[in-house]
Image (cartoon, helix red, strand yellow):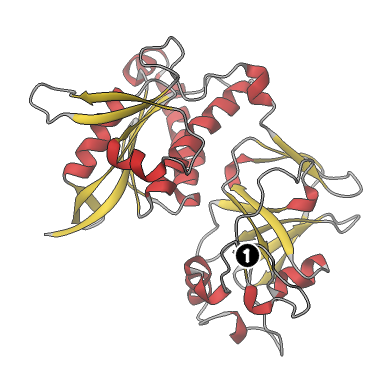
Amino acid sequence: MERKLAAILAADVVGFAGLVAQEETATLERVERLRHDVIGMQVGAHRGRVFKAMGDGFLAEFSSTLEAVRCAVAIQRTLALQSARGAEPQLRVRIGVSLDDVVVQGDDLLGTGVANAVRLQSMADPGGLALSAEVMSHVRGRMDLEMVDCGHKKVKETDAPLHVYKSGRSEGAASAGLFDFDPGALKALVVTGGCLCGKIRYEIDMPAISSGYCHCRFCQRFTGSAMSVWTAFPSAGLHLVKGEPRFFASSPIAERGFCPDCGAALFYRLVRPQPAAYVVVFKGSLDAPEQNAPSAHSGVESRMPWLEILDDLPRTTCAESRVLQEAWGSVGLKDPQEWGPGVKPSAPF
């Protein structure tokens, strides 16, 4: 049997059977939107993989424990934000995250790591999450996450005890969900932005994934500057509230959006080998660009020699990006340098 170490995220809809009994068709439609627009998008955006969907339950694997927990937080915050926006009644989910050995069986995963994630999920509060002690040791001090040490717990008497950490200010608190904020506070988390002339306005109701600087030739040409500064969000969270941007294929693997009136740079999105689960928003178009400070430099092979980088953030070339290499490989090219007449192009992610 092939084994590997993986972080496993287990999510389950709260009160699914009762919801189906009350409104079967509407509930199943909401679960499908949850699967595609929230869980599927967030897992993909955090470089994970959903390997099993069972009606109202979902299992996903991650090679990074930190990304798994960030994904769990993003799912819960997304559902809370959507609820605060006054849309249709939102489903609530419980989420558990474990870190352990799993057994690989084709595209499926089995074993202790999967079983523990499901057990943790069952112990989480609605709208919250439960982490194993191993997971907590990986994220402690690296995320602003308030968790309560609940000690060792069992789901069944025959189970081995699990050391559990749960979201909330105290165990058994009346409001133990991770994002049980008041509606006003949640609405304040919605990100807004637009172009220079105001013809295009957008809102984003899902939390940011990452931010960074890109020095690649594509971004230099698109922005007319030595580099671009961007923040990535899940695609499903972006809503145009005014106007329509124009998109053009800046390479065989990606397209960029801009205002057709003022020319302001707005968006970047990968389209190969399939549409990406995230959209890159150029920071200058955000109403509050000071939020989500950049955490890395990419495309540094094209950095201008007169631009000195003084911070100690990670620096990568486009050739070191697995996502970019997969995209270029899908169109039969090794890297961006093989495409374009006399140009040394790359891309921002």
- Residue at 23%, 47% in the rendered image: 100
- Residue at 83%, 54% in the rendered image: 259
Q: Is residue 104 above or below residue 237?
A: below
Relative image position of residue 68 (x, y in whole percent): 40, 45
- Tally of marks: 1
Q: Which residue is mark 1?
A: 297
Residue 173 in the figure: left or right of residue 122? right
Q: Is residue 229 visible?
A: yes
Which residue type carries mark 1?
His
How dense is the environment of label 1, judged by Cα within 10 Å: few (below 14), some, or many (20 and up)?
many
Relative image position of residue 184 (x, y in whole percent): 68, 18
Residue 56 in the figure: left or right of residue 103? right
- Find the residue positioned furthest to the bottom: 342
- Out of 162 and 346, give the one closest to the viewer: 162
- Residue at 60%, 63% in the rendered image: 312
Relative image position of residue 175 (x, y in whole percent): 46, 13
Q: Is residue 171 above or below residue 308?
A: above
Secondary structure of residue under mark 1? strand
Q: Quadrant of residue 17?
A: top left
Q: Is residue 85 visible?
A: no
Residue 291 in the figure: left or right of residue 1? right
